[in-house]
Image: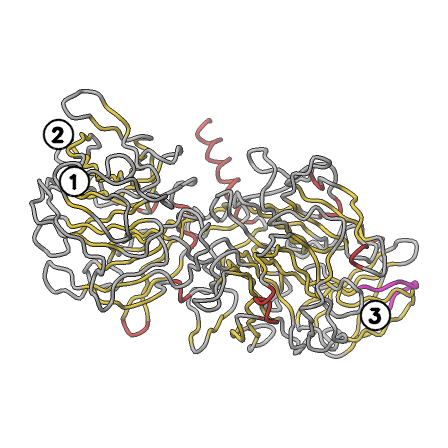
Amino acid sequence: MLTSFGWAGSATRAIAQNTAFGFEFREVAKVVQGADTLRSAWAGGLDSPQFSGIDLDADGRQDLFIFDRRTRRVLTYRNAAAPGGTRRWQYAPELATLFPAGLLNWALLRDYDCDGRPDLFTSAENGADIRVFRNVAGAGGLPSFQLVTPQIRAVLPGSTITVNINTGTNMPAIADLDGDGRLDILIVDWDTNRSIYHYQNTATTACGGLAFREASDAWGNIRNCLGECGSYLFSATPVLCREARPQHSSSSSLTVLDLDGDGDQDALMGRDYCPELVSTLNEGTPQLARMTAANANFPTAAAPIRIPFFPAGYVVDLTFDGRPDLLAAPNLFDNLDSVDTRRTVLLYENTGTGPAYNLQPRQTGFLQQDMLEASSQAAPVFLDVDADGRLDLLVAGVKRLTPASPLVASVAHYRNTGTAARPVYQLITEDFLGLSARKFGALRPGVADLNRDGAPDLTVAGYTAVGRRAFVGYYPNRASAGQPASFDTNDLRLISNLPNAFDDNATFFDVDNDGFLDLLYATNSTRSDMPGQALRYYRNSGSATPETAFVLANADFGQLRTATGARPANLSPVVADFDGDGTPDLLTVDASGQVRLFANLRAQSGIFIDRSSLFYNAAQGRYDDGYLGAHTPNHFALAAADVNADGSPELFIGTEAGGVLAAGTRNRVLSTRPAAAQALPLSVYPNPAAAATAVETTRPSRLTLLDLTGRTVRSVSVPSRRHQLDLRGLSAGVYVVRCETPDGQVGVQRLVVSE
């Protein structure tokens, strides 16, 4: 009985999940930059990625695991077949959830138990110790990770006392150093001992142990006084360092590999605030390493590795030839130093035919060049810029437009050169409207007709790089309705009466259904006179001046909280009819990386009821949270638009890493409201329509035409039984005609606008 009941309950939950509404990550549209069509345009960006090889789909081929240190996000790529019998790396977001949640600082895959399945070594929850997850065979042979130790410890020399192996802020090297088949650990300690600690694996079994002892406090005789970048000392005895000038940081990366093919482990070393990945060759033995010189122009003087800040090296076969290649990438913990991280992952192919490496530069921006990338804090929005009936894509981000230019916010413009149903976004400019000249420190754009003239205005939330003054405002569209957009960047009109804290966000939506766009304002403000880190509802008073029209109606709208009960930081809201029930839904994401759906926003009150686990995972047949990465500094920006004219808004998520994720809806049910019998009868003809359509109701009514994000694109305020609706200038797609009588009877019907 118990077994039968448990099985039935599990099956019911699985069916419910598979048939529930949600999203699924997809390549929803082509993106073209120059002559290149981006193969993984919507992968979400890479910032400070760490790479390891692993068979993710049980096909016997090595796939790719990536942990982005700064954003704490996991990305996975399949080793996939390509035309002509070749192989390529294919973005596979559904496999990311195979890995444990909550990874931080560093994550490396190494097989410690010799079962052929790489295990996961990563920073412990305290950010310093090492914890290990064993890779066991899961369902279908897919990886499954079980925590085997939350803290690796080691025996001190000449003692039975054990201490935890503390990595600090450094990335360790984990490899078999002495050739006994067991994984050893190297930890950099430039702060106190100015050397590298060697922890030898002392397990007595042939393989599989995690017992360690401190074998040396100066592996390879490598010393560092934190002087000039690329400089190292070599001594078997401690060195006396002068009192150094103030250091930016002593964090380091360490990678070991047999560069010269002589059977022992050499080293690659990187330091924070330094661009060089420095090599040093082992002139000793596997059992007793001895280094005597450092090469700051590795691998060659003609093509040395240079990463903007804090390089780290990763040894993985990236070219599908069975030989390990080398990747160099930034290992940033934060981006306080204003680094532009676009195209910073360098691929060096190993062309050697023997045991020694022969590294040749092959690619700048490995995987990054296949993504839509804005360096950091990407924020997408859709606007028919040229009034050709097709939505174009704008992506804000914080980047350097040239190597010598400052790191400021700018907006890239991708014109839709395809069709309304099959969009192709072609990069036109990385500096739409020349906004980089305004020197904003961050910018999150939106689209709303705030002045009610029928032409969409460009809304913006952000702050100035100089003076760091936060704001929410808009650039009025000076063009007539249906004409190409025209904005004057000298005419930024600021919304008044807002707290204006850093990284605030805003979206405009008619919350109270009175025909005026209200303001949903996500703020990080910690002002004492009202709650901080909340979603605030500012009602539109109907004033002819949008700058002063918004009046605070609710300072903690919906009382939104994270899964831990905390107030959400860096909250981003968007409103659209996602689930297809004819009512607007609120979708939010915050620094925790959790996307939440508040269905039927207008029917919510008090503490809003939400649903998470919104993203369908085809590999596991269930919904999950999408694994966006949880880190307090993370910024996400949501946008919704029906980009393929299928009647359903797609979801777009701008990420801290500067990329954009795209997801389509799944199991969207187009239903009518329960009160449909009392709805105002209306007819729309012709439908579909291209230039104009007529709307007739049985009683005089006001008319509003909305797109699927809930944005008003046309409105008629004078009640009438018949309205002639001008559709010129609208993007092709599905719209909602809403008619309301003076006494509140409402009728709704969908309208398809064709090209």
Report the amino acid beneath label 3. Val
Q: Position of residue 330 (x, y in %)?
A: 36, 54
Three-letter residue code for mark 1: Trp
Q: Which residue is mark 2?
A: 204
Instruction: Decide which of 469, 270 is in the foreground and name it.
Output: 469
Q: Quadrant of residue 740?
A: bottom right
Report the number of numbered marks. 3
Residue drawn where x is 71% and y is 53% of the image? 584
Q: Residue at x 51, y 54 (%)?
A: 655
Residue 705 position in % (x across, y down): 77, 65
Image height of 513 relative to 738, above or below: above
Mark-to-mark CA distance, 3 and 1:
81 Å
Mark 2 vs 1: CB contact within 8 A: no
Q: Please give left or right for residue 44 compared with residue 664 in the image.
A: left
Q: Amino acid at mark 2?
A: Thr
Residue at 20 percent of width and 65 percent of height:
300
> In the rendering, at what x and y percent does residue 340 appear?
44, 60
Pick whichever, 69 or 239, lies toward us.
239
Alpha-carbon span between mark 3 and mark 2: 83 Å
Question: Where 238 falls versus 357 (above or below)?
Answer: above
Instruction: Report which residue position mark 3 lands on.
Output: 695
Q: Residue at x 73, y 40 (%)?
A: 555
The C terminus is located in which quarter? bottom right
> Which residue is nearer to you in this view: 177 or 271?
271
Q: Give the magenta range.
A: 696-704
Q: Quadrant of residue 394?
A: bottom right
Q: What residue would you read off at disc 1?
A: 219
Spatial CA distance of label 2 from label 1 is 23 Å
The overriding secondary structure of the stretch rendered in magenta is strand
